[in-house]
Image (tube, helix red, strand yellow):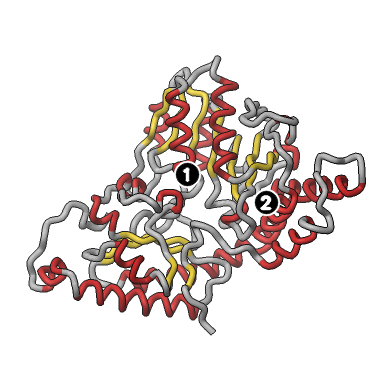
Amino acid sequence: MLQLPVYLDNNATTPCDPEVLATMLPYFTQHFGNAASKHHTIGFTANAAVEVAREQTAHLIGAEPGEIVFTSGATEAINLALKGVYEMYNPKGNHIITSITEHKAVLDTCHHLEQMGAEVTYLPVDAAGRINLADLKNAIKPTTILISIMYANNEIGTLQPVRDISAIAREHSIIFFCDATQAVGKVPVDVNTDGIDLLALSAHKMYGPKGVGALYVRRKQPRVRLIAQMDGGGHEKGMRSGTLNVPGIVGLGKACEVAGQNMLDEGTQQQKLRDQLEHALLQLEGAYLNGSKVQRLPHVTNIAFKYVPGGALMAALSKTVAISAGSACTAGTNEPSYVLKAIGLGDEMAHASLRFGVGRFTSEEEIQFAITTITGTIATLRAESPLWELHKDGVEIDHEGWHHP
C-alpha cells in the first residue's frame, strides 16, 4: 500500500537503511564502550568497531584507513578542511579559490576566513552549473594555497570536472579540497584517480545515521597537514578531539559498505525512475529543466514550472509528495536559490523551481503517483493564476528569468 507522503527529497537526507540500523544497535547497549578506553575489553570492542568502519569508509573512496578522520558530519569536515588548511599554510599564502554554487557550509566558512585575512575568489559557473577551467587557471596566484570545488551540486546535481580541476591544482602545487557530500555513495569516487587531497562526506546522505561524517586527509604525494579546530584529548590523531560517536561511526561504515556493493545497480534504477518523472513533468507547458541534462547525478532533477510559484506548489503537495525548492540548509529563507541564480535564472524562475531526489527505496508506483499528483496540482494552481489566464489568452507578460536556461 502506498504510504504518503511520497518521499522525493533524498538530497536533503535519506532514511537509515535497515541493514545499517541493525549493525548500529548493539553499540548503544551491548557494546557501549568508549573507543578511547582500550585498556579493557568493552572499550577495545568499541575501538575495533571504529577501525572496521574506518576501513569501510576508506574503501568506498579509494583511500587508506589512516587517512579517514571521523567528524559530526560534512559541515564539520568542511570547516576542519578549510580552516585547518588556512591556518597551517597561511605563512605560504592566503588565497583560496572556490565557486559561487558551493554549499553554504563552504561559502560561510570562506566568508569567515575572509574576516581572518583570507582572500577568496568565487568562480562563476555556466548555465549547466560547471566552472570554466580557464577561469580557474586565471584565478591562480602565487599566494593560492587551496582550491575548493564540490564534486556534485546539491540542488541541480551537476558534476564538476573534478579530474581536470585536480590536474590544474597539481600543476601549481595547490591543495585540492572537494565537498563530495552528494556524490559519495551515488557515483564512483576515488581520491587517487580523481586526484583529491581533502574530501568531505556525510552518512545521512547515503542511508546512514545523521550526526556523523568524515574528512579524508591525504597522507602522501602530497602529505596534507591541518591545524585542528577542536582541542581536548587528541582523538583522531589530534585532528578532531572528542569522544567518538561509536554507533554513528559504525553506521557510517556499514552505509559505505552497502553503497559500494549496490551503487552501480542503484544508480541505473534511480536514473530510470528519475527520467520517468522528469520526462512526464517536462511534457507540461512551461516546464523547464535547470542545469545539465548529461553531467549530473543519476537520481536528481530540478524543474521550473512557469506561472506556478514553487512555494505554493510545495505547500499544496506537502501532505502527498515531499520535495524541496533547494538546499535544506537554506529552506528557512524566502530568498531565491543562489545556485539557480548563478546559472542564469531570474528571481521568478528560481522561485518556481523544485528539486526532486529519487532514492534507494523509491518505487515506480510512487513515481506514478507523484506524476499524477504534481500534474493535477499544477493545473489547479494555474487555474487560479491571473498570469496563466493572460498567457492562455495570448498575452505574454515579460518577466525576467522566464526562459529556457
Position of residue 205 measured from the top left corner of the image (x, y, whole percent): 57, 55
Secondary structure found at label 2: helix
Position of residue 114 measured from the top left corner of the image (x, y, whole percent): 43, 25
Quadrant that contains the N terminus: bottom right
Whether residue 288 is visible: no
Quadrant that contains the C terminus: bottom left
Q: Nearer the viewer, mark 2 or mark 1?
A: 2
Q: Which residue is mark 1?
A: 161
Looking at the image, the residue that sits furthest to the right is 40
Q: Which residue is mark 2?
A: 60
Position of residue 175 measured from the top left corner of the image (x, y, whole percent): 56, 29
Residue visible at 60% across and 62% down in the picture: 264
Q: Earlier in the sequence, mark 2 or mark 1?
A: 2
257 sits left or right of 92 in the view: right
Looking at the image, the residue that sits furthest to the top is 91
Q: Residues within 10 Å of mark 2 (few under 14, many from 20)?
A: many
